[in-house]
Image (spheres, rainbow, N blue to C red):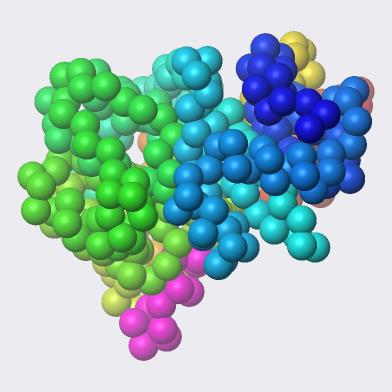
Amino acid sequence: MAIELNKLLDVVVDKGASDLHLAVGLPPVIRLHGRLRQLNVPALTQDDTTAFMKSITSERSQIEIKEKGGCDFGFAYEKKARFRVSVFTQKGNTGLTLRQIPTKLRSIEELGLPAETIKALMDRPRGMILVTGPTGSGKTTSLATMIDYINTNMDCHIITVEDPIEYYHNHKKSIITQREVHNDIGTFAEAIVKSLRMDPDVILVGELRDLETISTAITAAETGHLVFGTLHTTGAARTINRIVDVFPKEQQEQIRTQLASALLAVISQVLMPRADVPGVIAAYEIMIITPAVEHLIRENETHKIISAIQTGTKQGMVLLDDSLYSLFTQKKITYQTMMEFAQNPNDLSSKVQGIKK
């Protein structure tokens, strides 16, 4: 093997890269501050990637790779870092993507979230809070920060259900139970049902990926628990539509009613390269469920949600494009980056006319 995996992981840790890509026919590639960069080493062979895979996977995972073409798991690299690993097969070759999980939890303020709004949500005894965004947008980090805030400041029993577990939490003022799907429990939906028998106050669901999981999570929120979940959607309105569309048409009206009463907030985020200093920065859309928003969800008028967010700034709401515009005017992101992530780029373009691009 031309290079040892440990040396590649050291590069990731030392440079503060977010991801390491290992593919046959290419040198190892890291993602640094949102951009892909090839390392100055020879292209990898199938023997290289297979050896990398075998060095960090269990026998059970190797069987899963043969049967299903891939697997996902958490991996601790000595005491230096943790990684979320995705092993996959493509064109008959083995490939790996390793995402570095920060070891230090950041505060709500450090993430750039509006602290007063978010902390008020954490104080709610029941309901559902959704954190959404594309892959790699920092959803897991935001959720880990919120869970750590509750863990530090409140006496609760917190249960997390993840696939795999990424951030490890210690017991603080709260008791925290972390369960990994496939290792500790069969499915997300099963884990939520079992959690209700474990005297929980807070339940985190790593991904709302199917009808059964979404349905049980909503029920948990309705029955007196604070539930956190994630979806791969951008924007509050799209998140509502995505949840409702998972269900058969004959159930959708009922789900809208349940969702309207159970939901507390949708926090949608994107992660972008910074323009002022090396690194990345997040922009957020925040929708708080006011009586007006609750009515829009129940009556299937999600197309009016953008207007409701625009008029809900006093309640802590903000549109993603307004968050992007604010970061642009502070020179924290470039004009090109703002436009790349904008929901309505034409509106933003008109807004910045007269500003030097």
Nearer the observer, 196 or 49 = 49
Q: Quadrant of the C terminus?
A: top right
Q: Quadrant of the N terminus?
A: top right
- Taking the image as shown, residue 155 lies to the left or right of residue 243, namely left
- Measured along the vertical axis of the image, is residue 219 above or below residue 236? below
Q: Position of residue 354 (x, y in %)?
A: 89, 28
- Measured along the vertical axis of the image, is residue 127 above or below residue 12? below
Question: Which residue of the protein is positioned furthest toward the bottom in this rendering?
Answer: 250
- Taking the image as shown, residue 152 lies to the left or right of residue 133, namely left
What is the span of residues highlighted in magenta in the rendered image? 240-252
User: Residue at coordinates 13% horizontally, 54% vertically from top-left?
Assistant: 196
User: Residue at coordinates 44% horizontally, 35% vertically from top-left?
Assistant: 166
- Taking the image as shown, residue 202 lies to the left or right of residue 275, namely left
Q: Position of residue 63 (x, y in %)?
A: 51, 59
**The quarter of the displayed image where residue 340 is located:** top right
Nearer the observer, 296 or 89 = 89
- Measured along the vertical axis of the image, is residue 144 above or below residue 233? above
User: Residue at coordinates 16% horizontally, 29% vertically from top-left?
Assistant: 175
* Residue 351 shows in the view: no
**The quarter of the displayed image where residue 99 is located:** top right
Q: What predominant SS class does the magenta segment belong to?
A: helix
User: Residue at coordinates 33% horizontally, 70% vertically from top-left?
Assistant: 212
Q: Position of residue 6 (x, y in %)?
A: 65, 22
- Taking the image as shown, residue 109 lies to the left or right of residue 71, namely left
Q: Position of residue 257 (x, y in %)?
A: 29, 69
Total count of labels? 0
Determine if the magenta segment contains residue 63: no
* Residue 204 shows in the view: yes
Nearer the observer, 78 or 114 = 78
